[in-house]
């Protein structure tokens, strides 16, 4: 809809930025930290390990000062489970607690609201060796870990996120490290893992409300509008099916405590429906999230399968991962969108569509926890970094966010990916997302110096003007 006037961004809007522990911290085995699945997984050839990452563990003070200079009102980061409980369910590591307390106090010093993800792709390897999320006892381990977080940091954290991109961990289990298997057995197992994560999430949300009544907690999946390639009803059906499997399976459980009907039909048809134990539905219904957080990079476009062809990526354009299912949907390209140098489609209006859709379905406040452009940056001789392509991407998405607010979406925060350069999940350090450049390459750690990109100054002004100047 067109709006005669825009409301602008609300007072107190959380202008933020995001990172995750294993992609930014480094210090992979320091101060008692245990190994996570990210430390032990087989690396994609040509990509670096996560031993040093951006070395934030040793630069956190300097980094937070830069976040404050940029004007951040919120910083979304994750706590490494393996720093707090190195083997996942044993002794608590005081050095890990101290690191995050210091970080949180530093953020508070600058009036930056922390938004803490409890688990971002880095399951303790010791738990993985016992079956990881396939093993129901991992639910108890996660609840225990969350309990430690509420007790140790409850005085410093108001906004919590449970699990980052659970849907991507299921749909791209091999790339993210959730599974090593392939084929039907892998899918059956992944949907059982999913059920366990959903239960773990629900129990942690309930625990949060009991232990920290002033706190707010939400899920953090990756959500995107799924377009039908044409208005052929068969293509529309395919897009609805894929959206149920990709989006609503996760959010419907998080908010309503029930499996989405179409996703259930799919799971039953394929023989992937998980084992549900007595009391599970009650547990799922007890979650009651306070807000929805989601990551948004792009949309998907699908069509009905034709002659058995099938290829669609849940993150369309990401050439490394491509899935599709015969009899359900196949990938289609969208002629209205352009792609980044890494092949990701860019769809700012799709962002508004997705915001509108999530707001209409769930009626909860929304925080965007990731959105951004991965690109190769060049440092000029004088140390400046001109990244107009990143500014352009973010500006276009913020314009759409403002329109979504006018549409009626209760958007309370925007945390683009990423606050500072870090390692991509599977495409190395050269694929940069940050407002702050970190001087290292994939195979050369250099001096890890921090440099402000043009986008740093641009975002600083956006925040200063509360989004009036984009
Ligand atoms: C999301 C993850 C992040 C981040 C981002 C960018 O899926 O939550 O951890 O990495 O995508 O993706 P990539 O690093 O693959 O470019």
Image (spheres, rainbow, N blue to C red):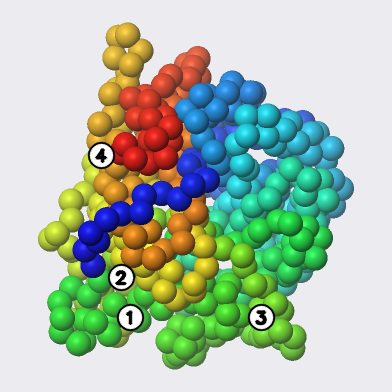
- Location of residue 386 with respect to 330 vertically, above or below: above
Q: Residue furthest top?
A: 382
Q: Could you give the CA–CA distance between mark 3 and mark 4, rounded to whole angstroms?
A: 41 Å
Residue drawn at 49 percent across, 72 percent down: 363
Provide the residue designation for mark 3.
285
Disc on the earlier residue, 1 or 3 = 1
Name the mark on residue 392: 4
Question: x, y (%) of residue 301?
Answer: 24, 68
The secondary structure type at the circle numbered 1 is: helix
Which numbered disc, 2 or 4, marks the residue that appears first in the sequence?
2
Q: Residues within 10 Å of mark 1 (few under 14, many from 20)?
A: many
Residue 226: numbered disc: 2
Do the residues under discs 2 and 1 have CB atoms within 8 angstroms?
yes
- Residue 240 - label: 1
Q: Dot 4, how many residues are within 10 Å of its Cα: few (below 14), some (14-19), or many (20+)? A: some
Q: In terms of depth relative to the viewer, which is nearer, 198 or 135? A: 198
Q: Residues within 10 Å of mark 3 (few under 14, many from 20)?
A: some
Counting the numbered discs, the total is: 4
CA–CA distance between discs 1 and 3? 24 Å
Measure how far apart labels 3 and 2 are at the Cα level: 27 Å
Question: The residue tagged with tag 2: helix, strand or loop?
Answer: strand
> Which label was assigned to residue 172?
none
How many C-alpha atoms fall within 10 Å of the one at disc 2: few (<14), some, or many (≥20)?
A: many
- Residue in the foreground of this view, choosing between 46 and 242: 242
Pick out the residue farthest to the right.
91
> Marks 2 and 4, how far apart in space?
23 Å
Q: In the picture provided, is 235 more to the left or to the right than 101? A: left
Dot 2 or dot 1: first in sequence order is 2
Q: Nearer the viewer, mark 4 or mark 1?
A: 4
Where disc 4 sits, the SS reads helix
């Amino acid at each position: 809809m067109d709006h005669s006037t825009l409301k602008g961004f609300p007072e107190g809007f959380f202008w933020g930025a995001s990172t995750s522990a294993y992609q930014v911290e480094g210090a992979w085995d320091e101060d008692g930290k245990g190994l996570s699945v990210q430390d032990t997984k087989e690396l994609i050839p040509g990509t670096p390990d996560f031993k040093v990452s951006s070395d934030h563990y040793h630069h956190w003070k300097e980094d937070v000062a830069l976040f404050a200079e940029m004007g951040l009102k919120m910083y979304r980061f994750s706590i490494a489970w393996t720093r707090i409980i190195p083997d996942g369910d044993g002794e608590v590591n005081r050095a890990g607690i101290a690191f995050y307390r210091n970080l949180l106090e530093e953020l508070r010093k600058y009036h930056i609201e922390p938004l803490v993800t409890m688990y971002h792709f880095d399951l303790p390897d010791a738990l993985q060796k016992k079956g990881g999320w396939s093993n129901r006892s991992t639910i108890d381990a996660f609840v225990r870990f969350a309990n430690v977080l509420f007790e140790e940091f409850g005085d410093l954290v108001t906004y919590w996120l449970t699990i980052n991109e659970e849907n991507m961990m299921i749909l791209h289990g091999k790339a993210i490290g959730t599974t090593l298997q392939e084929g039907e057995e892998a899918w059956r197992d992944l949907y059982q893992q999913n059920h366990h994560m959903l239960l773990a999430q629900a129990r942690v949300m309930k625990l949060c409300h009991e232990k920290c009544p002033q706190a707010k907690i939400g899920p953090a999946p990756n959500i995107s509008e799924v377009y039908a390639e044409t208005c052929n009803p068969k293509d529309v059906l395919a897009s609805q099916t894929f959206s149920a499997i990709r989006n609503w399976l996760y959010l419907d459980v998080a908010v309503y405590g029930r499996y989405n009907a179409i996703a259930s039909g799919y799971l039953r048809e394929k023989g992937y429906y998980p084992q549900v134990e007595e009391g599970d539905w009650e547990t799922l219904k007890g979650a009651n999230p306070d807000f929805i957080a989601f990551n948004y990079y792009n949309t998907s476009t699908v069509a009905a399968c034709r002659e058995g062809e099938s290829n669609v990526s849940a993150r369309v354009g990401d050439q490394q991962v491509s899935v599709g299912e015969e009899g359900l949907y196949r990938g289609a390209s969208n002629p209205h969108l352009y792609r980044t140098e890494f092949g990701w489609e860019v769809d700012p209006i799709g962002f508004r569509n997705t915001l509108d859709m999530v707001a209409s379905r769930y009626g909860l406040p929304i925080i965007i926890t990731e959105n951004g452009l991965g690109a190769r940056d060049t440092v000029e001789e004088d140390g400046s970094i001109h990244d107009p392509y990143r500014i352009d991407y973010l500006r276009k998405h913020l314009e759409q966010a403002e329109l979504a607010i006018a549409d009626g979406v209760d958007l309370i925060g925007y945390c683009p990916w990423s606050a500072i350069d870090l390692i991509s999940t599977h495409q190395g350090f050269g694929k940069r997302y940050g407002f702050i450049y970190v001087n290292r390459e994939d195979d050369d750690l250099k001096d890890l110096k921090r440099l402000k990109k043009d986008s740093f100054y641009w975002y600083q002004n956006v925040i200063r003007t509360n989004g009036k100047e984009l």
